[in-house]
């Protein structure tokens, strides 16, 4: 596994654990997820969307293609 893939996996796990801890039942936008993350590691909703979009390719995330996109982990 390349370094970039390992880094993205760590980011995904951080997002997943944060959403799980928040006990959110409905799909969230990348901006809503960014609001839940309090450590400042993610600088923009775009980064969150990128990480979640890549995990969707593996079936770990469902992307609801609406405006705005929503993510179900």
Image (cartoon, helix red, strand yellow):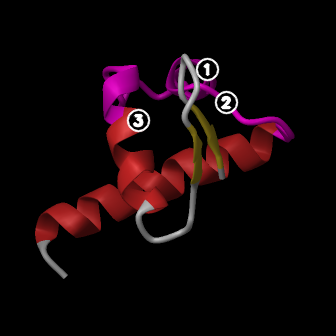
- Decide whether residue 44 is among the magenta residues: yes
Question: Mark 1–mark 3 contact, CB under 8 Å?
Answer: no
Q: Is residue 57 left or right of residue 33?
A: left
User: Distance from label 1 to label 3 (Cα)?
Assistant: 10 Å
Residue 14: image location, x then y, percent: 51, 50
Residue 22: image location, x then y, percent: 79, 36
* Total residue callouts: 3
Please, which residue is most extreme toward the front here? 66
For the stretch drawn in magenta, the main secondary structure is loop
> Which of the 4 image quadrants contains residue 71?
top right
Residue at x-position 30% and y-position 57%: 8
Question: Mark 2–mark 1 contact, CB under 8 Å?
Answer: yes
Q: Which residue is mark 2?
A: 28
Residue 54: image location, x then y, percent: 35, 56
Helix, strand or loop at label 3? It is helix
Above or below residue 64? Residue 29 is above
Helix, strand or loop at label 2? It is loop
Residue at x-position 86% and y-position 40%: 25
Q: Residues within 10 Å of mark 1 (few under 14, many from 20)?
A: few
Q: Which residue is mark 3?
A: 48
> Which of the 4 image quadrants contains residue 6?
bottom left
Q: Which residues are magenta?
A: 23-47
- The answer to which of marks 1 and 3 sits earlier in the sequence is 1
Q: Quadrant of the N terminus?
A: bottom left
Relative depth, front residue between 37 and 68? 68
Q: Which residue is mark 1?
A: 32
Q: Residues within 10 Å of mark 2 (few under 14, many from 20)?
A: some
């Amino acid at each position: 596994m390349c370094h970039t893939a390992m880094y993205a996996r760590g980011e995904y796990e951080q997002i997943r654990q944060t959403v799980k801890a928040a006990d959110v039942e409905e799909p969230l936008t990348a901006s809503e997820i960014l609001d839940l993350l309090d450590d400042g590691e993610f600088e923009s909703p775009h980064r969150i969307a990128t990480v979640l979009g890549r995990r969707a390719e593996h079936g770990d995330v469902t992307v609801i293609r609406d405006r705005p996109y929503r993510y179900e982990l």
